[in-house]
Each structure stands twice: as C-alpha cells, then as structure tokens.
Amino acid sequence: MAGGLWVPMSVRAATSAVVMGAFLAAWSAGAGAAAPETRAADDFPVASDVRLGGDETQTRLVVDLSAKIDIRAFTLANPYRVVIDMPQVTFALPPKIGEKGKGLVKAFRFGLVMQGGSRMVIDLARPAKIERAFVLDAANDQPARLVLDLATTDREAFMRTIALNNRAPERVLRKYEPADVEVKTNGDPRPLVVIDPGHGGIDAGTRLAPSDHPEKAIVLEFSLLLRDKLEKAGKYRVVMTRTDDSFVALADRVSIAREHKAALFISIHADALQRGEGEAQGATIYTLSETASDAAAARLAEAENRADVIAGLDLSAEPNDVADILIDLAKRETKTFSVQFARVLAGELKNAAKLHKEPLKSAGFAVLKAPDIPSVLIELGYVTNRQDLKSMTSEAWRVRTGDAVVQAIDSYFTARTAGRASGRN
Ligand SMILES: [Zn+2]
C-alpha cells in the first residue's frame, strides 16, 4: 500500500478513477454516447446559454451548445421533473440561471453526475409531457441547440407515461458490476474502510451553507485528509466514494462499500439549522434506525436523502434479492457494531472537536443501509454556526479531528479483533 507516501491529489484522483470508470461504462451503454474520460475539460461541448419561452400550456427550453450531442429525456414524479441526460458538457451559463423558471418550468439545475456524463434536471410547475426533445445541428449563424418542448397534462397521464417508459433510468446508472471494479486485495488482510464524502457535483449539500463553503467542499476536504491519515497509519485499506467534485448516487455509495466488502463505512456531512430554529453547535454521529431518535434527526435524514431527488434519481426501487430473514440477522449484528463504533467515536471526538449536546442519534439515512457493513454518518458541525464553520474550514481543526477519527477506528478494530467470536471481520 502507498502507506506513508504523500501523493499529489491530482494523481490520487486519477488512481481512483477506476471506481468512476464503472459508472462511465454503464453510462455509455445506457446513453449510447461515448465520452472518453481522459479528455481535458475544455474539450467537452460547452453549454453557453439557456432560454425559456412560452406559457403555462406550452413551454420551450433551448440550450445553446458548441457541438451537437446525444440526449435522452425522461420524466420523474414526486416532485414532477424532466431529466435530460447527455455526455459530459461544460456548463458556462450565466450565474443564477435556472433559479427562476417560466411557464411549465419552475426551475432547473445542471451539472456533472458522473465522469463523462452531465444532466439537466427541470423542476416542473405542474405535470407536463415531453412533446419533443432533440438537438439541432449548427446552421447559418446559429449554434447547435438542444430543444425541449413541454405541454401541460394531468397527473394521471403523467404517471401513465412514467409507467410506460418503465425502463427505470436509475437502473442504468446503478449497474455496478463487481467485474467492472478492480478490487486489488491481493490477499491483503487489512480491514477496508470506506470514506464517503457527502453530496458532490450537481448536489452541493445543504442550501444554508455560505456559497464560498458549500457542504460538498467542506466534507470532501475533511475526507481527503482522513484518508491520508488512515493510509499513513498503514493498518487499513481505504476506498473513497468520491475524490473530486463528482455526483455519486446514494445507492452507489452503498454499492461501492458492498462491492469492496468494507469492514466499516463512514459518511461525512455537515449540518445546518434554519434561522429561528435556535442555536445548535457541534458534531453529531448517526447510526441507522427505522425510527428516528427525534424530530430533528428525522428531518435531517430526509434532507440528506434528498440528494437523489436533486440529481433526478429516485431511490424507491431497492434491489431485494436476498431472503429477508438473512438480511434481518445481518442487520441486527451490523447495528450492534455500528452503535459500538459510534460510541467509541464520540469518546474520541470530544477531545478534539465540540460535540452536539446529544452527540449520538439515529435516523433512516439511505447511505447507512448496507445490511452487512457497520456504518455511521458524521455531521461534523453546523455550517450555520459561525464557530463551527470557522472550525470546519480550518486546517488545525481538520487535523485534530481527523486524528480523533483514526484513533476511534483503531480502538474499534482492536476491540473487535480481541473479542471476535465468529470469523467475520
Ligand atoms: Zn449532507
């Protein structure tokens, strides 16, 4: 293992492109578009403007493009959305574009959802059908243009269209075959820890974070430092669910942990509190539970689980291929270990960082749902609290807190090795 060697971030990002490569393969197969991931960013087609026209019965959305691309458009419900998938595009659009819509379009967002693949998600003001979605060649002095024509419809017709186009788009994205991933264990017996920086790409995390410190950036920076510390310790193998500003679907985060047979999964997030909800401060550690420990925990889990709504993916169809009773048994054991790790972690963290007054909670976070991998989610602090934000964006705090997490991981695995009754790791 690279162990004590510090490698520049760009190189590391390239080595873990192996994980994203699987997504790219799935993407290309699904969209029929090949987008070599090695191209420089400025080689990608550029979207330079978006215009909306029409009214509440018919609305047209036009995107100016530097080159013709293949697209695929489909609808999703709850909330009503149109999703347009395309090969990787550089969005060079005016600031704040998409925040306000027109006619049937309430708002839209856009971004990279995986290496080689971009997406526009259009929030609809009401149910609408896609009348046309196509890309025009550049002609005369007009650039290439993506055109989406929407017409009003009712909920029943909208839902029927979704049922008919039942080629669940998320299935394509989630096709995460073990064979696609090089799991280089080489008989390496060290436990594998998955670090999962929340959000990324099109999903910036909590909207209450200041724009110069989005949640996705705060948690990535901490996660990269934690990875370096863990690798340096030499006792663990480490896999990240993302190493750059890419979108990773919630289910894929869990799949990555399962495909790598992780011994521990740690998701990293930062919390936020609306004005008027009081003052909260400090770190909180969450484990999975069907029933949330309190209303705030339930609300937070709902907010964190919204990532897939933001990117246009729906998480409703979970694969269900193992007998329920086996899952139940594994889940019970996994829960015990998750709670054990959470307690050890709280004990270590309190020496390094400020903890929330109730630092151990539980709720239904989608990323904690691997039935066989002890998993916790750390909310490092509140981006809406000045002191917390100052801490989370300071190198000294990150180093101290990262050390505490490594210490907790050490204690947890030491205890498990010592007290192991079964052969599981
Ligand atoms: Zn988050």
Image (cartoon, rainbow, N blue to C red):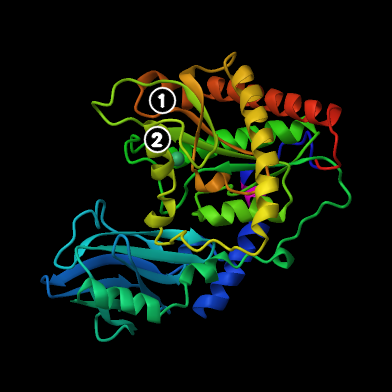
Q: Which residue is mark 1?
A: 389
Amino acid at circle 1 = Leu
The span shown in magenta is 10-14
Q: Residue 133, how many percent across, how many down?
A: 31, 80
Task: Look at label 2 and name its amino acid.
Answer: His
Q: Residues within 10 Å of mark 1 (few under 14, many from 20)?
A: many
Q: Which residue is mark 2?
A: 213
Image quadrant in which the C terminus is located: top right
SS class, disc 2 = loop
Q: Position of residue 377 (x, y in %)?
A: 55, 36
Quick check: can you spot residue 38?
Answer: no
Q: Quadrant of the N terminus?
A: top right
Above-or-below relation of 202 to 381: below
x and y percent of residue 206 in the render? 37, 40
Q: Is residue 366 above or below residue 30?
A: above
* Residue 254 in picture, x, y percent from top left: 60, 52
Residue drawn at point x = 31 percent, y = 73 percent: 159
**Residue furthest to the front:** 325
The quarter of the displayed image where residue 154 is located: bottom left
Q: Residue drawn 61% across and 59% down?
A: 20
Image height check: is 4 above or below 8? Answer: above
Residue contact between numbered discs 2 and 1, judged by CB atoms under 8 Å: yes
Residue at the top extreme, as displayed: 351
